[in-house]
Each structure stands twice: as C-alpha cells, then as structure tokens.
Image: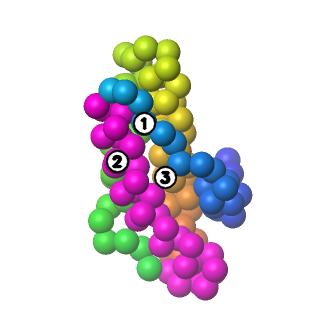
Amino acid sequence: MLSFVDAYTLWRSLPFPRSGPLEESVLIRSDLVLADQYVTTVIRFVEDGVFKPVVPDALALLDEILERAERLGDTADPETQQIARSQHAYAALLHLVYSKFLEAGADGHT
C-alpha cells in the first residue's frame, strides 16, 4: 500500500485521464473533474498543514466513479476499455489520497 506522501506525489504528477467516444466515458470524466477538485483540499494540508475536509462526500463520489468505470471497462470495445481503466486507476488514486488525508488529519499529523 502506498503511503500518503507517495500517493499524493503520484497524484500530483499524473496526467488527468481522457474520455472516450461513449457518453458514459465522458460523464465519468466529468465526475472525475469534480472529485479531483474536491481532493485538491489535500494540497493545503501538505503544503500548509491546513486540515479542512470538503463538505460533499468525496469518497462516496469516488466509489460511484470506480463502480461506473469498472462496468464500462467490462462492456466496452478495447479502446474504451483502456480509457475506462485509466479513469478507474485515477479515481482509485484519488480515493487513496483522500482517505489517507482524512486519516492523517484525524490523527493530528501535518
């Protein structure tokens, strides 16, 4: 399992996944944009020690995205499967980063 700092560093250097030609792929990417925006609160925690979780349930949104990307990957053509895997991996990394952020903040670590 990646540490919080490793997951954070990987997320910050990873390119944002693209969408494919299917509407569901576009919708997943759109929701990923929103989830990514929520998770950016982690940057203030890492850089300034400010622990301020977002009000929306970012983890629930990411769980939904993960499920949808997995379903899309199971039923799509090979190109869309690759895009769905990329979206799924990005969402999984966001989930890990935000989960570790909540753990670190609850433990009082900065």
Residue 74's label in the rendered image is none
Residue 47, above or below 40: below
Q: Earlier in the sequence, mark 1 or mark 2?
A: 1
State which quarter of the image contains the C terminus. Answer: bottom right
* Residue 17 shows up from this direction: yes
Question: Between residues 92 and 105, which one lies in front from this camera angle?
Answer: 92
Amino acid type at circle 2 is: Ser
Q: CA distance from mark 1 to mark 2?
A: 9 Å
Residue, x 53% and y 70% (percent of image)?
Answer: 42
SS label for mark 2: helix
Residue 49 lies in the magenta-colored region: yes
Residue 30's label in the rendered image is 2
Residue matched to label 1 = 19
**Residue contact between numbered discs 3 and 2, judged by CB atoms under 8 Å:** no
Residue, x 36% and y 57% (percent of image)?
Answer: 34
Q: CA distance from mark 3 to mark 2?
A: 16 Å
**Residue contact between numbered discs 1 and 2, judged by CB atoms under 8 Å:** yes
Amino acid type at circle 1 is: Ser
Q: Residue 93: percent from the left, percent from the top?
A: 56, 49
Local crowd size for mark 1, using a 10 Å CA cut-off: few (<14), some (14–19), many (≥20): some
Amino acid type at circle 3 is: His
Q: Magenta residues: mostly which secondary structure?
A: helix
Q: Nearer the viewer, mark 3 or mark 2?
A: 2
Q: CA distance from mark 1 to mark 3?
A: 19 Å
Q: Earlier in the sequence, mark 3 or mark 2?
A: 2
Q: Which residues are magenta?
A: 23-51
Local crowd size for mark 3, using a 10 Å CA cut-off: few (<14), some (14–19), many (≥20): many
Local crowd size for mark 2, using a 10 Å CA cut-off: few (<14), some (14–19), many (≥20): some
Residue matched to label 3 = 95
SS label for mark 3: helix
Q: Residue 47: percent from the left, percent from the top?
A: 63, 80
Query: Is 36 on the left-hand or right-hand side of 12?
Result: left
